[in-house]
Image (spheres, coloured by chain):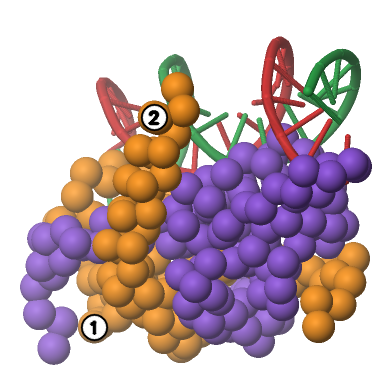
Chain colours: A orange, B purple, C green, D red
Amino acid sequence: MTRPLEPDMFAGCAPVRPLIQIGGKWTVKIIACLAEGPRRFSELQVPLRGITPKTLAASLRSMERDGLVSRTAYAENPPRVEYELTSLGRTLFRPLAAACEWTSAHLPDLIAARATHDAGAALST
Amino acid sequence: MTRPLEPDMFAGCAPVRPLIQIGGKWTVKIIACLAEGPRRFSELQVPLRGITPKTLAASLRSMERDGLVSRTAYAENPPRVEYELTSLGRTLFRPLAAACEWTSAHLPDLIAARATHDAGAALST
DNA sequence: CGGCATCCAGGACGATACTG
DNA sequence: CAGTATCGTCCTGGATGCCG
């Protein structure tokens, strides 16, 4: 085991980043918010505490570009726009949820490890 | 369905980011590289095409801090240092792999969606 | 209400050069 | 070999303000 690493092991996987960071730090939460069904712009702002309209719009446009969400504008007054996961976006939900579950399950470990590590670093100062 | 969104739905999940972006764009690949067993610093640089020593060192230190990898230095000449996934780090591999598989499976969709979207944008110019 | 334009701060990352 | 130091760049994302 521990064969030599393939220099090109990430050749076809280079865009791992687009997944991990498809549109920035909000993407994951936005998908979670849209998991149940269509949501309005302002509706999304609620759970995404403190996200600025600009950032939310940018994230949504990016995800729309990637075919993850669809945008539907209604010519009403006042204006109404709804965002919804596409079928592609819905397929992304599952692995993302798995990742989130890992976080929930191991957050204490992360925190503990960090505390231990920082404590050790402090001693050697 | 489509109940109102919980304002605090991410309250305990705020650190989703640490997972999605645990240490930046290299973390995922580093974990993949360490999946099979311990690796040396310079060994990791090979598949991580173009990563600078500084960035690799920073990524590794960050992951070590989070308890995801362990560092073992051997007092030899020439120096040798090996990095290895901790048990915690190994538990992270599975969900990460799932996410990578999603990327591999749906990359064509992403590219197609992006092309379509960009084409539409070009028309309206 | 939805969302774009502008400005700006901070962090991630690369290039290069240098140590134990 | 395994880093560290310094510098510079790019990008993310927040603040503010204007438009349909």
Task: Name the spot of residue B8 as percent of width and height, x first.
Answer: 12, 61
Nearer to me, C8 or A94: A94
Question: In the rendered view, does A7 fall on the left or right side of A124?
Answer: right
Q: Are marks 1 and 2 in contact (CB under 8 Å)?
A: no
Above or below A72: residue B75: above
Residue B48 visible? The answer is no
Q: How many marks?
A: 2
User: At numbered mark 1, what does the secondary structure look like: helix, strand or loop?
Assistant: loop
Q: In the displayed structure, does residue A75 sit left or right of residue D7?
A: left
- Callout 1 crowding tier (Cα within 10 Å): few <14, some 14–19, many ≥20: some
Mark 2 or mark 1, which is nearer the start of the sequence? 1
Quarter of the image for residue D15 reads top left
In the depicted view, which residue is nearer to us: A98 or B88? B88
Which of the two marks, 1 or 2, is nearer to us in this view? 2
Dot 2 alpha-carbon crowd within 10 angstroms: few under 14, some 14 to 19, many 20 or more: few
Q: Residue at x 32, y 46 (%)?
A: A115
Residue drawn at 84 percent across, 45 percent down: B76
Query: Distance between the Cα atoms at labels 1 and 2?
Result: 46 Å
**Mark sitting on residue A36:** 1
Q: Is residue A77 above or below residue B73?
A: below
* Rendered position, B39 above or below B113: above
Front-lying residue, B43 or B18 = B43
Which residue is tagged 2? A122
Give percent across and percent down for residue A95.
46, 82
